[in-house]
Image: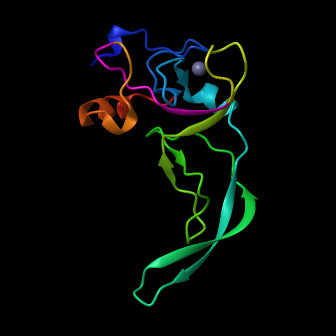
């Protein structure tokens, strides 16, 4: 894999050998799950009322009643619950690698305040793959790294 092209470690705590994230649209700084968890922003979701359609599908109608989302921890697959809130069964299922954090000034020249992080999957050119374009083998490499 291409991690050796670049020092694959957390810019904040220096941790190596774990999954790392980077700001949306950028290739640094790299940030680990634990540093992201400590900086997570308390988010709210648009509460939905669930109903079953005649064809059996379930639909959630947004109420615009904003409810607090639970504090997340990143799971072994590098996922947290989506910011959509619980599903029709009331469950917050980890399904997104997108981490929304508050990045204090001084860590990055280009990013501070509310910052969206995506997986840092090194590219052979020294940058990172955009998450949607990363080849399966690169996604697997990232997913197989320990989360913490
Ligand atoms: Zn860290």
Does 124 lie within the magenta span? yes
Q: Position of residue 124 (x, y in %)?
A: 28, 16
Would you place residue 48 above or below residue 33 in this image? below
Q: Position of residue 84 (x, y in %)?
A: 59, 57
Quarter of the figure with residue 73: top right
User: Which quadrant of the frame does ligand 1 lie within?
Assistant: top right
**Farthest residue toward the bottom?**
54
Q: Position of residue 5 (x, y in %)?
A: 33, 9
For the point 49% across and 23% down, the residue is 26
Quarter of the figure with residue 77: top left
For the point 30% across and 34% down, the residue is 140
**Front-lying residue, 145 or 23:** 23
For the point 49% across and 14% down, the residue is 9
Would you place residue 144 above or below residue 73 in this image? above
For the point 39% across and 9% down, the residue is 6
- Can you say which quadrant of the picture contains the N terminus? top left
Does 117 lie within the magenta span? yes
Would you place residue 70 above or below residue 19 in this image? below
Q: Position of residue 57 (x, y in %)?
A: 43, 80
**Front-lying residue, 101 or 94:** 101
Q: Is residue 43 left or right of residue 51?
A: right
Q: According to the image, what is the colour scheme of the structure?
A: rainbow
Where does the magenta region start and end?
A: 114-125
């Amino acid at each position: 894999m291409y991690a050796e092209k670049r020092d694959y470690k957390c810019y904040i705590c220096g941790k190596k050998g774990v999954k790392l994230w980077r700001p949306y649209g950028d290739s640094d700084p790299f940030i680990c799950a634990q540093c992201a968890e400590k900086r997570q922003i308390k988010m709210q979701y648009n509460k939905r009322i669930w109903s079953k359609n005649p064809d059996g599908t379930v639909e959630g109608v947004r109420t615009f009643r904003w409810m607090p989302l639970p504090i997340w921890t990143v799971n072994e697959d590098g996922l947290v619950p989506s910011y959509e809130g619980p599903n029709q069964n009331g469950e917050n299922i980890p399904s997104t690698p997108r981490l929304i954090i508050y990045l204090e000034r001084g860590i990055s020249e280009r990013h501070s305040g509310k910052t969206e992080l995506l997986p840092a999957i090194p590219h052979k050119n020294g940058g990172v793959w955009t998450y949607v374009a990363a080849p399966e083998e690169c996604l697997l490499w990232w997913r197989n790294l320990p989360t913490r």
